Image: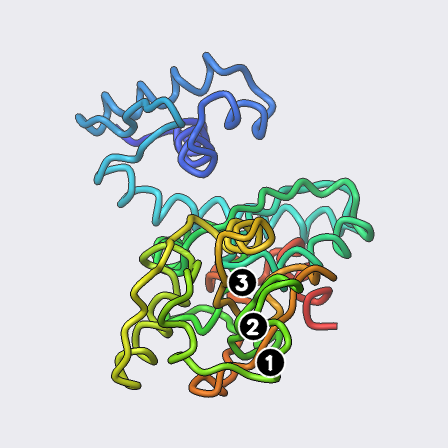
Amino acid sequence: MKPSPYQIAAFTAAARERSFSKAAAVLGVTQSSITQHVAKLERLMGTLLFVRRRDGLELTPAAEELFQVSDRLRTLEQIIDEKVASYGALSAGHLRIIANAPRPALPVIAKYTQLHPQVQIDFSLYSWTIAMQKLHERDMDIAIITEPEVVEGVSLHEMSQTPYKLHVRRDYALAGRKAVSLADLNEEIVVMPEDGSFTQRIVDAKVKAAGLQLSRVIKTSTFPVVKEAVLHGVGVGIVLEDSLFPSNNLVALPIREMPETYRHCLVTPPYKRDLRLVRSFVDVALE
């Protein structure tokens, strides 16, 4: 027996949203309808597709394999719908955007929502490693990632380049310097994003190449927490210069051993780049 289009649509929406209730809202049906279609598909396949967790649905290996195909099918259906309808304006829709730093993603999102206020945007920050994992799994519509790995088939657009700098509070002892060396940070408390971040990899490599060791490091979850920690006097932070919203209370100092610049890139899965919503976001980002 073949699965019905309704079963595939319900499964795909639930897998995208990681929620039966959100899937129901997206498809404009009841939650019981979603669960019934998924249950029938599970019986047809003879395997469990979702595990219910407190924070949402977790895909089983069988579901992940099916989702790789069904999500492409749903995207193609969306493209067909758009072409048939010949939309004259973007009056509705839903974009899932991820990034490994708040900027340059948030300024683009702010501009896009002003132009298209009816488009719903889900934005999530992840470590560089998790963001790359989601890109490999095609678990988003758009990703804005610093120096992304090469992924077959994705569309990549460079948005900007920026160096790493040491961020210190304006009243901090180092704030009056024109530049600092990594050796100057040996006795400082250095705040950085968690393991798995691009920053962690770069800083570790630079410190090792210089024959040094940062003895006092505090790791946090995301770039915004690094900024808050520095502003609260916890220590100093090494982050990309334009990854945080500027603050009059912070000073960004060049690091002598880290003069290189790194690319912020916008990437989209190959089968989603032709979606009108995705294309419109890319156009705004690259203006």
Specify the quadrant that holds the C terminus. Answer: bottom right
Of labels 3 and 1, earlier in sequence is: 3
Q: Which amino acid lies under the numbered mark 2 shown in the image of this protein?
A: Leu
Question: Does the rendering let one see residue 118?
Answer: yes
Counting every numbered tag in the picture gives 3
Residue hosting label 2: 174
Q: Secondary structure at mark 1?
A: loop
Please name the residue shown 73% across and 41% down the image: 92
Q: Which amino acid lies under the numbered mark 1 shown in the image of this protein?
A: Arg
Q: Residues within 10 Å of mark 1 (few under 14, many from 20)?
A: few
Q: Nearer the viewer, residue 82 or 104?
A: 104
Q: Quadrant of residue 154?
A: bottom left
Q: Which mark is residue 177?
A: 1
Residue hosting label 3: 144
Q: Nearer the viewer, residue 73 or 215?
A: 215
State the separation of the CA atoms marked 3 and 2: 32 Å
Of labels 3 and 2, earlier in sequence is: 3
Instruction: Where is residue 247? Give x, y as percent.
Output: 71, 60
